[in-house]
Image: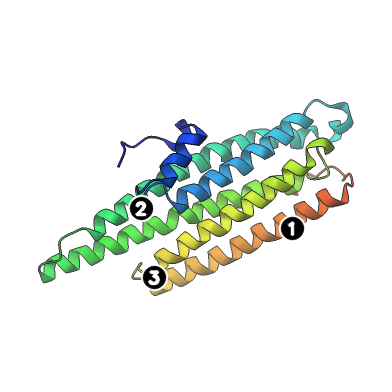
Amino acid sequence: MEPITRFGDLTVARFVDRLASADPVPGGGSAAAIAGSLAAGLVAMVASLSEGRPRYSEHAVLHAEAIGEARGLTDRLLSLADEDAAAFAGFGAAMRLPRETDDDREARSAAIRQAARGAADVPFRTIQACAEVVGLAEALAGRSNRNAASDLEVSALLSLAAAEAAAANVRVNLQVMGDDSAARDLAERTDRLVQEVQQRATGTRTIVASGEAREPLGAGRR
């Protein structure tokens, strides 16, 4: 395996090359987070293309907030791609622990359960970030540069794909967490959050398809 490098520092081609290799990382969790970061980048782009334009001046506050928040989400999701790789490496290390004696097996099982909790937490946080991204996309739809409206739809689709992909990684780790109650709780929260992302993605696409302008958002309505 190559030395650890922040995925955000790689070229797109190099990241894809790493993804296509026989190395176990980056894997699906990192790919999901990267997809989410692209969705956030598109939101920032649309808001930037709308900022300062008289036609959309009534939405100026939204545009400024969306740019800052979306760029922050881009960075957060790129970091989550790195965290996912580290979590997977930790799980792999736990799986390779010795199991010759009863004490070995007990220690290994405990380490696997602990690693699984971390490996489930990272993709869950990826879903949370995707929910924020698609929330921004939905808020901007009909309140931003119409020439870039399709980019909001693409952002919503990427957010949904990333959230569903991350959810698959949450669920696979629930099976070995060793805490049925915590696993059920996380599974339920994951399902609710993915459903929210799906609803907001559908809302964004519907608004974009209508081509209609929308009234400014009131304070705290997003």
Q: Is residue 159 left or right of residue 59?
A: left
Q: Residue at x 21, y 58 (%)?
A: 96
Task: State whether residue 180 is above or below residue 49.
Answer: below
Give the image location of residue 157, x and y in percent: 67, 52
Give the image location of residue 10, x and y in percent: 45, 32
Mark-to-mark CA distance, 2 and 1: 32 Å
Q: Tag on residue 175? A: 3
Quarter of the picture containing the N terminus is top left
Residue 108 in view here: yes
Mark 2 or mark 1, which has the lower sequence index? 2
Mark-to-mark CA distance, 3 and 2: 15 Å
Instruction: Decide: few, some or many residues near mark 3? Use Cα within 10 Å; few <14, some 14-19, many ≥20.
Output: few
Task: State whether residue 128 is above or below residue 151.
Answer: below
Give the image location of residue 79, x and y in percent: 46, 40
Mark 3 or mark 2, which has the lower sequence index? 2
User: Residue beneath label 2, please?
Assistant: 88
Helix, strand or loop under label 1: helix
Instruction: Decide: few, some or many residues near mark 1? Use Cα within 10 Å; few <14, some 14-19, many ≥20.
Output: some
Q: Residue at x 51, y 47 (%)?
A: 33
Mark-to-mark CA distance, 1 and 3: 31 Å
